Image (cartoon, helix red, strand yellow):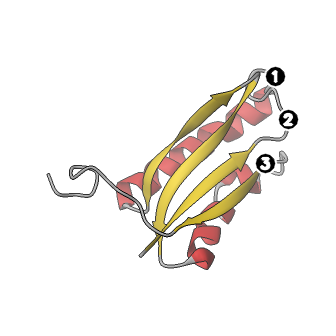
Amino acid sequence: MAYFFLRLVPPRPRFPHDATGEEMAAMKHHVAYWHRNAEDGSAIAVGPVFEGEGAWGMALVSAQDQQAAQALADADPIIQSGHGFRFDILPMPSIILRPCAAGNE
């Protein structure tokens, strides 16, 4: 397994503060999608990061390779919604996890 940092880049700098109703509805599907990935073990941590006047999203995932990480990103309903979101996918050659996050409780 390999680790990847996925940065969800929003369509505008002030997102989510200026989000439309349609975008917020799509975000609900995005959240449900990442909850499922967390439950199945491919997503280690997922959430919003507030910066300046807006926010972007992050996901730390474990995947077989870059192609599998890309497939996770591509399957996100927010990407498929056509609202202008995109992912930056960055490989992480190693990570340090606290024992309970690594499944060693």
Dot 2 corresponds to which residue? Answer: 12
Q: Secondary structure at mark 2?
A: loop
Q: Amino acid at mark 1?
A: Asp
Would residue 104 appear left or right of 77 to someone viewing this image?
Answer: left
Q: Residue 91 location in percent, x, y?
A: 58, 67
Pick the residue in front: 56 or 85: 56
Q: CA–CA distance between discs 3 and 1?
A: 14 Å
Give above or below for 25 relative to 68.
above
Q: Say which mark, if any, is on residue 18.
A: 1
| Quarter of the rendering containing residue 5 | bottom right
- C-beta proximity under 8 Å, tags 3 and 2: no
Q: In the image, what residue occupies the spot 60% across and 75% down?
A: 66
Label 3 vs 1, first from the N-terminus: 1
Name the side, left or right, on which 21 lies relative to 34: right
The disc placed on residue 85 is: 3
- Image quarter of the N terminus: bottom left
Label tally:
3
Circle 1 crowding by C-alpha within 10 Å: few under 14, some 14–19, many from 20: few
Residue 75, placed above or below residue 23: below
Residue 90: quadrant of the picture: bottom right
Q: Judging from the image, what secondary structure is the residue with disc 1 in? A: loop
Which residue is depicted at the point 84% across and 41% down?
11
